[in-house]
Amino acid sequence: MPRTLKIFVAGLVTIGAFALVGTSLAFGAHPGWVLGVRTNIAIGGTSESAVIAGVLFWTVVTLFASALPVTLPRGTVVSVGIAPIVATMILGGPVAAAWVTFVGTTELRELRGRVPWYGTLFNHAGVLVPAVLGSLVIEVVGPGSDPAATFVATMLGSAVLFGLNVLITTTGVALRDGLDARAVLVGDTRAQAANLFALAPIGWLMSQIYMIRDGAGVWATLLFGLPLYMTRLTYSRLVEMREMFTQTIGALAEAVDKRDPFTARHSHRVKEIASDIGRVMHLNSGEMEALEWGGLLHDVGKIGVPDHVLLKPDRLTREERMLMNSHPVLGAQIIAPVTKLAPELPIIRHHHEWYNGSGYPDRLLGEEIPKLARVLHVADAFEAMTAARPYRMKPLTTEQALGELRKFAGIQFDPEIVDAFVKTGWVDGVPDPGRAIEPRPVPMLAAAAGLMTHATTLTDGGNETPAAPVPFAVAPEVTPRAIDAG
């Protein structure tokens, strides 16, 4: 475990322990409170036994609701147990919220030993501290029995609970996995925001129903188990659908790679390298997802390249090179009908464009090339150079491959992307020759002509329609064959 994560976990657990003990002592002597718990949580009176019964009730409800959390793509979790915690914050105040959270957030994976002891303490403290602070906000803003005031106070207290909990968990995930905290935070924000707006009002409503006298409120509160279960099921299905989509894309990429025994798992490795570059560049969640899926699918167009070209061990002829160079366009055409993959289309089509404008298929120049395509180009080239190919059975060493990337930065590769790649773990401990003097990206005549043709639009009835794609030409062999990422 990284040292920074150890310090973070130890600090949070210490704060959680102080919050648990401190609130119990501080609120124990308040008038109208029993055992430090506001008497609204009691059933049938204000006796100690009634208060204990109320705390136990909400602890059991929270236990059932928190037993099976849903893990989101970036590693944080969503649990519908937040709803009964919010209800406890309203009914019992900070002490009840602290104890119900401390015990009630126990998960099945913790009981089965799948989470280390320090992870269990971290998970509980990560909810306990925000719950105590959120309940304090409710006490200050909207104490009493007025439903409208309580609702406003509940939403404010819940915002504190959710906001601080998300901040704690995303920081922990980022430190544990070596990720950018901002990327983790933004990546799961939408699901967490939906959690707030869906579960906070449910928690408020549960608290109002619970206060119905003669025990009817207790049984009516249990009916909220169904909407909570359906909410959890919805989160689970959304995550499962995304995972299934990713697995399907991965299977398609592997099927393409297996046409050539030399490129087995190529697309998966390119995805991993590109994702690491993206993390160094602090790309947002949408861009990271596009890199992940675009990396897997960047060579899908090779389905349309004949075997005698794809598997040829010798130097390709001009006609064969044109067939090989068609795969980015074919790939974009294959993926175009899938609307979910629209952000990946520029990556697939332009991952062989060169920074100096001499690439293919559209001969884009410099920053005209989509940023994510420039990232993938570096990842693709490095993976190709460090793996065996029919035309080069002996792979380049990591040091040699890095030297090639540095040598052709500003010609074939975006120098800033190469700088970001050097900061990834793929070249840890490898001597870096450093950035060379950057040549100014001046397009060749053919590249300039291609750009002018590609920018042309056809006007039809006042609506501008993009012209048909420019036929690609053979990319000049400016660099050694070993650097060809195809």
Image (spheres, rainbow, N blue to C red):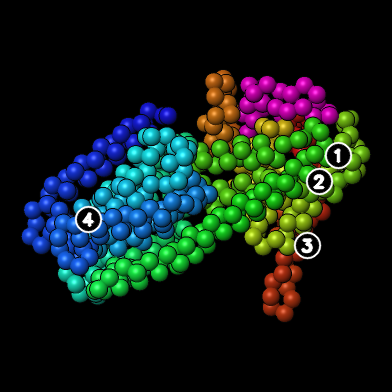
Q: Earlier in the sequence, mark 2 or mark 4?
A: 4
Circle 4 residue: 52
Query: 21 and 239: which one is in front?
Result: 21
Q: Amino acid at mark 1?
A: Leu
Q: Is residue 47 magenta?
A: no
Spatial CA distance of label 3 from label 1 is: 26 Å
The circle drawn on residue 310 is 1
Disc 3 crowd, CA 10 A, few/some/many (<14, 14-19, 20+)? few
Disc assigned to residue 302: 2
Nearest-to-viewer mark from 3 and 4: 4
- Give yes or no for contact between labels 2 and 4 (Cβ–Cβ under 8 Å): no
Q: Any magenta on residue 395?
A: yes
Question: In this rendering, would 296 be left or right of 287?
Answer: right
Q: Label 4: few (<14), some or many (≥20) within 10 Å?
A: some
Distance CA(mark 2)–CA(mark 4): 67 Å
Start and end of the magenta stretch? 385-412
Where on the picture, by quarter, is residue 320? top right
Looking at the rendered structure, the secondary structure element under dot 4 is helix
Q: Position of residue 316 (x, y in %)?
A: 88, 35
Q: Secondary structure at mark 1?
A: helix
| Numbered circle sitting on residue 336 | none
